[in-house]
């Protein structure tokens, strides 16, 4: 793992105790959405480009909504490291608050906690240096979708308001500048062929990628269950008609690709079929975005099924998943 200091600590400011509004424009803004304890909140990626971490509490759970623009990595963590993950002899630090260290580990955001100063690799949720080295954070079920779609799925959803302030991501130097949220400092990077910090800064093609079956910046939905990791590339889901199933850590999972995102649920053991109208299983149609069964308006038959259970997962680029988990990619057939 290559760890290097790239910008000053806190030059990209995390968000503490964010405020929320009921409406937001544009409706097609990409967001990280999460529902806990009957509450639903969305965090615009357009804002997270300039802050990368939002420390919040939802449904009584302290959460960290994290985003690494270089890795396209969106993960929501519980800010309380499980006791069993702590290094031997370490005291339980309780609830942590995370900031942006200014370091990168294999081009991924390195967070730090303000309680112990330990450093954490964002895409792994593991402490890589400091008092808590070796500890891990629990991934929470979340989705990356559009604000419009998330609001349709959660009538009472609210969305993070503009945090404001200054950020290095808004600057052409290492010194923070006033944020203009309508700008996208990573558009050229995402649309270009290269990947990594060098490609973002225009310092050449960036790192090398030797795989031909998956593009380096292919969106992947990453699952780590029962000690086993599996990354499911978007194109492999699309090639299968928008739905694939797999066994991960002894768990049966079903993964959907929709126009707005990638979604993973615990599979009750249904036989999933992709049709013109969507996805069908157990005699009814299903909404891949929410995991909810759909009533049949033509026959007035109610879909008397329970909604699928969303699994803890992360969305990230293929190269970042490979950095963390090697060749643990879903293979069709």
Image: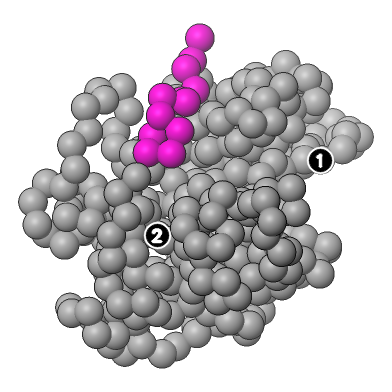
> Which of the 4 image quarters holds residue 282?
top right
- x 46%, y 25%: residue: 329
Lateral position of residue 92 relative to residue 195, left or right: right
Q: Name the residue under label 2.
A: 109
Q: In this view, does 288 lie above or below 85?
A: above
Badge 1, how many Cα within 10 Å: few under 14, some, many 20+?
Answer: some
Q: Residue 105 carries which label?
A: none
Q: Where is residue 25 in the image (x, y as percent from the top left)?
A: 50, 75
Q: What stretch is highlighted in magenta?
A: 322-333
Residue bearing the label numbered 1: 307
- Residue 295 location in percent, x, y? 82, 38
Q: What element carries label 1?
A: loop
Q: Above or below — where is 257 with respect to 145?
A: above
The reply to whether the magenta stretch includes residue 286 is no
Q: Quick check: 279 above or below 206?
A: above
Crowding around mark 2 (Cα neighbors within 10 Å: few <14, some 14 to 19, many 20+) is: many
Q: In this view, does 115 lie to the left or right of 173?
A: right
Residue plotted at (47% across, 26% down): 328
Q: Residue 228 or 179: which is nearer the viewer?
A: 228
State the residue in front, 267 or 111. Answer: 111
């Amino acid at each position: 793992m290559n760890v290097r200091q790239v910008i000053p600590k806190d030059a990209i400011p995390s968000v503490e105790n964010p405020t929320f509004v009921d409406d937001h424009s544009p409706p097609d803004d990409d967001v990280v959405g999460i529902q806990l304890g009957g509450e639903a909140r969305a965090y615009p990626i357009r804002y997270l480009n300039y802050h990368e971490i939002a420390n919040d509490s939802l449904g009584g759970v302290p959460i960290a909504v994290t985003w690494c623009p270089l890795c396209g990595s969106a993960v929501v963590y519980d800010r309380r490291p499980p006791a069993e993950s702590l290094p031997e002899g370490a005291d339980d630090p309780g609830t942590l608050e995370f900031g942006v260290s200014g370091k990168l580990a294999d081009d991924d955001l390195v967070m730090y906690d303000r309680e112990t100063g330990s450093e954490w690799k964002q895409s792994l949720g593991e402490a890589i240096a400091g008092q808590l080295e070796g500890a891990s954070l629990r991934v929470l079920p979340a989705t990356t979708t559009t604000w419009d779609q998330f609001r349709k799925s959660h009538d009472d959803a609210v969305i993070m308001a503009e945090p404001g302030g200054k950020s290095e991501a808004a600057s052409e130097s290492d010194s923070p500048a006033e944020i203009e949220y309508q700008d996208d400092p990573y558009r050229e990077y995402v649309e270009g062929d290269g990947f990594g910090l060098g490609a973002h800064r225009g310092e050449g093609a960036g790192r090398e990628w030797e795989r031909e079956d998956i593009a380096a910046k292919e969106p992947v939905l990453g699952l780590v269950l029962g000690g086993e990791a599996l990354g499911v590339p978007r194109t492999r889901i699309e090639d299968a008609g928008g739905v694939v199933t797999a066994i991960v850590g002894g768990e049966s999972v079903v993964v959907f690709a929709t126009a707005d995102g990638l979604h993973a649920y615990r599979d009750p053991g249904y036989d999933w079929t992709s049709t013109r109208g969507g996805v069908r299983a157990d005699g009814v149609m299903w909404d891949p975005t929410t995991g909810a069964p759909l009533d049949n308006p033509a026959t007035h038959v109610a879909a008397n099924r329970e909604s699928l259970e969303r699994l803890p997962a992360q969305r990230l680029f293929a190269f970042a998943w490979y950095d963390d988990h090697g060749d643990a990619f879903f293979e069709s057939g």
